[in-house]
Image (tube, rainbow, N blue to C red):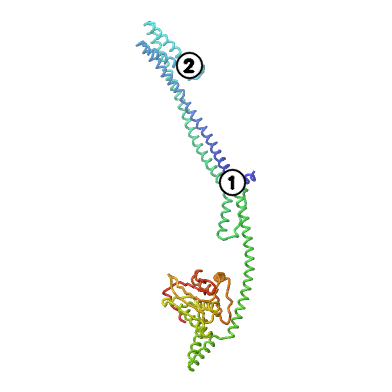
Amino acid sequence: MSKKIKSRSLWVKVSGMFIIANLFIFIVDLMLLAGVNRMFTEMEETYRENRQLNELSNALDSVQRSMTEYLDSKSTDSLSDYYLSEQKYAELAGGLDKKVSNRAYDRMERNIAYLSEAYLSEVALTIESKRGRNVERYRVQYEEATKLHGYIKEYIRSLNEERFASNSERYSILSVNFRKFEFFAGIVMLVVFFTSAFIIIHITRMLIYPLQALAKSADEVASGNLDAKLPEIVNNDETGRLTAVFAKMMISIREYIEKQRVSMEKERQMQEKELMMETHLKDAQLKYLQAQINPHFLFNTLNAGAQLAMMEGADRTYEYVQTVADFFRYNVRKQDELVSIENEVDLVDNYIRILNVRFSGDIHYESQTDERLMKVKMPGMILQPIVENAVNHGIREMGNKGRIVLRVYRDGERVYISVKDNGKGMTPEDIEKLLGGEWKYEEKKGDSNGIGMDNVIARLRLFSGRDDVIDIKCEGEDKGTEVIINIPYDKDSPSEEG
């Protein structure tokens, strides 16, 4: 039976619980109502006989009164009243019990019945004598009827008092019993209430418990505890099926997470190996470069050459060597520092001077800057790699026709720096790949500082906190390329002198 109940749907269980509880209360109410009705019926019956005797006495007085009125007036209305009252009293008197009994009540009731018959007979004779105008006779009969009326009234009064006394005692007993019944009914109602409440709470708890267990497990999972204990499947109803689905889902999630963990662990190990290999490779390259040249030795050597050129009066040679020394010093010190736009523009000027010495002044360079913006800060080593790309991939093959224009201007809260050349340009596909980090120029190591455009774009985006920090424009083949970067405007930015 228990298995059948557990397999029922939640709707059937709740409906059944409601129907059974209300049916139980309804049956108890019917029983109590029947008891109350029975008690009231008995109490109503207690004084029924007294009411009948009072009614009989009133009917007797009505007959006597209507007879007297007729005798006095001999009117049709009074005669009509007599017949009506006589008929009513005859009916009431006919209901009296005439059985022979030793009880005083029965004897008195039987005497009233017989006296009533004699009285009605005497009254009828009196009326007939009056109508026959037999004065002497109806007076004698009227006196006899009046005597009988007095006897009957006395019997009715005595019987009424006897019955009232007896009924009062009975009524007291019924009242006590009624109070006991009220107390008993109150106890029964309390028992029914608490029993119904206990049953409903118990059954409701049985129905809600699986949902509470499921909610508790779901809360733990929502808090991040995927190892929470799965709820037990108690019933085969909707809650049981929901619990089963939840358990199945959690098992699947745990299996999926375990697979992902194993996969990520393998991937992490592979990345660690690759990172270790890359670290060793960079360390080897760094040691190789350090072994080739010492920066301080290089600076000291270039400074010594510049002093020698100055002493010999070779001003152009002095200026060139000094420019190369400043260029390398900036490369070593400024790559990871914030600098001013002025520092970056000076580096580009030095870089162009070095190239023009190497290529006999083939590069035409123009700088258009707003001096009010020269102190704004930006990442170091940004402009020189852009100009370097413009030279190597834009105008190198153009001889003395190559031209580069660098502009610094402000628009709103952004500072824009444009590097524009008149070289061979870029295709839209190459521009898209470059901005997306999917393609790099192949740098000739002898002419490059080792900082590619992907590095420049990444550092600009990191500095500004947004992606739209660089734009590349080209109107077509052999129409040149313009690279425009934008950085936040901060008028209070101090410059980085180096």
Q: Position of residue 254 (x, y in %)?
A: 62, 60
Q: In the rendered picture of this protein, how many numbered marks are placed on residues?
A: 2
As helix, strand or loop, the secondary structure at mark 2 comes to helix
What residue is pinned by disc 2?
A: 94
Identify the amino acid type marked 2.
Gly
The relative height of residue 121 versus residue 17 in the rendered view (above or below) is: above
State the image quarter where residue 280 is shown.
bottom right
The relative height of residue 57 versus residue 433 in the rendered view (above or below) is: above
Q: Pick the quarter of the image with the N terminus.
A: top right
Crowding at dot 1, Cα within 10 Å, few <14 / some 14-19 / many 20+, comes out as some
Residue 297 or residue 70, whichever sits in front: 297
Q: Position of residue 203 (x, y in %)?
A: 57, 46
Identify the amino acid type marked 1.
Leu
Judge whether residue 41 can be spotted in this image: yes
**What whole-number distance in Å separates the C-alpha atoms at marks 2 and 1?**
69 Å
Q: Position of residue 343 (x, y in %)?
A: 47, 80
What residue is pinned by disc 1?
A: 10
State the image quarter where residue 119 is shown.
top left
Identify which residue is drawn at 38% across, 14% down. Answer: 66
Residue 302 or residue 22, whichever sits in front: 302
Decide which of tag 2 and tag 1 comes sooner along the chain. Answer: 1
Identify which residue is drawn at 59% across, 50% down. Answer: 239
Left/right of residue 245 with respect to residue 423 in the rendered view: right
Identify which residue is drawn at 44% across, 74% down. Answer: 409
Left/right of residue 283 with respect to residue 61 in the rendered view: right
Identify which residue is drawn at 51% across, 33% down. Answer: 33
